[in-house]
Image (spheres, rainbow, N blue to C red):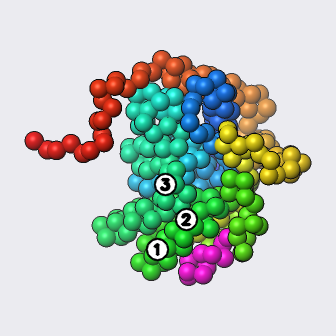
Amino acid sequence: MVQSTTEPQPMDAKRGLLFLYQMLLIRRFEEKAAEQYTKAKIRGFLHLYIGEEAVAVGVIQALREDDNLLCTYREHGHALARGIDPDSIMAEMYGKMQGCCRGRGGSMHLFDVVNRFYGGNAIVSGHLPLAVGMALATKKQKKTNLTCCFFGEGAAAEGTFHESLNLAALWEVPVLFVCENNLYAMGTAIKYSHAVTELEKKGAAYGIESVAVDGMDLLAVIAAANIATAKVRSSGKPYLLVCNTYRFRAHSMFDAELYRDKKEVEEWKKRDPIPQFEQFLLQKQWITDEEIAAFKSKIENKIAIAVDFAEAGTWEPLDQLTKFVYSETAN
């Protein structure tokens, strides 16, 4: 299940260990997904989240279980941080019926209504209007939940981004826009696609409170996300949180990655959020090196189980091919 309905709590040993576990789980899940892709077990597109784990974990910990969550096609990490079972996600990526979308969504279209996880959306910026609509529904129904929408800096160059921020501000709806600025929209560096590269300034243009944070620092993301969600809940108005981060892997498994220098990637890897947070926990004496090793072993086993589950899954029968294409009429 997802996080508690209670508001975010101060950092302590228990929460610290949970966050480390989540980041390590995301990292190993993504590494295994890459392995299975090279074996043709996973087909289609595959966009890895390696390097950006602090953003998903740091923001999602601030959400309540009744909050709505929408993401891009690079959403495996968000799904795991939200509490969706790794078995269900891996089976979905395999195209098996036991997946969260019966194998019909695949890597880019994870969806889980129980966890209020509404995609996995493959069209760049296409889900921003959906987020505004969900937040408007919340306001009309006089509910207290918010809608959180993750997107990349590439989406911030789309007209839909500006239309969505404009309407969110105009209608004063409770939506948290989270921009994961990993500096490259596919193979295009941000400096070639944005006249203003400080993306938080784009929110301010619509009167939306906007903040930029180091997306490689889990503690910084947690602090910023806690403030952001509190303000959205208290004001009922939109908020833009820009998390400046970096993906260590190529845009997708089809990407030859010729657009950035390998030295640049290696420099960013020195800021890997996982070792940074491990050091924080070690300094606090909330964990030991032996416990970190045990964590990694436990996660390795969990991922192995997820792969076995996906391998043992079943394909959807051909006679159900047209099922769900049209809504079923009531008797």
Q: Quadrant of residue 290?
A: top right
Name the element at disc 1.
helix
Residue 177, label in figure: 2
State the residue position of label 1: 168
Residue 81 lies, in percent from the top left, at 56, 44
- The quadrant of the rendering that contains the C terminus is top left
Q: Looking at the image, can residue 5 be seen? A: no
Name the element at disc 2.
strand
Residue 238 lies, in percent from the top left, at 50, 72
Residue 100 lies, in percent from the top left, at 43, 36
Q: Is residue 112 above or below residue 212?
A: above
* Pick the front one: 1 or 139: 139
Q: Mark 1 or 2 closer to N-term? A: 1
Identify the residue at horizontal 48%, vertical 59% (top origin).
Answer: 127
* CA neighbours of label 2 inside 10 A, class few (<14), some (14 to 19), many (20+): many
Q: Write the start and end of the magenta stretch as one range.
A: 199-208
Q: Quadrant of residue 177?
A: bottom right
Query: Which residue of the protein is positioned furthest toward the left in this rendering?
Result: 331
Find the distance from the CA under tag 1 to the CA under tag 2.
Answer: 10 Å
Name the element at disc 3.
strand
Name the residue type under label 1.
Ala
Identify the residue at horizontal 45%, vertical 80% (top origin).
Answer: 170
Find the distance from the CA under tag 1 to the CA under tag 3.
Answer: 15 Å
Pointers 1 and 2 in contact (C-beta within 8 Å): yes
Residue 70, label in figure: 3
Name the residue type under label 3.
Leu
Identify the residue at horizontal 72%, vertical 75% (top origin).
Answer: 195
* Pick the front one: 125 or 206: 125
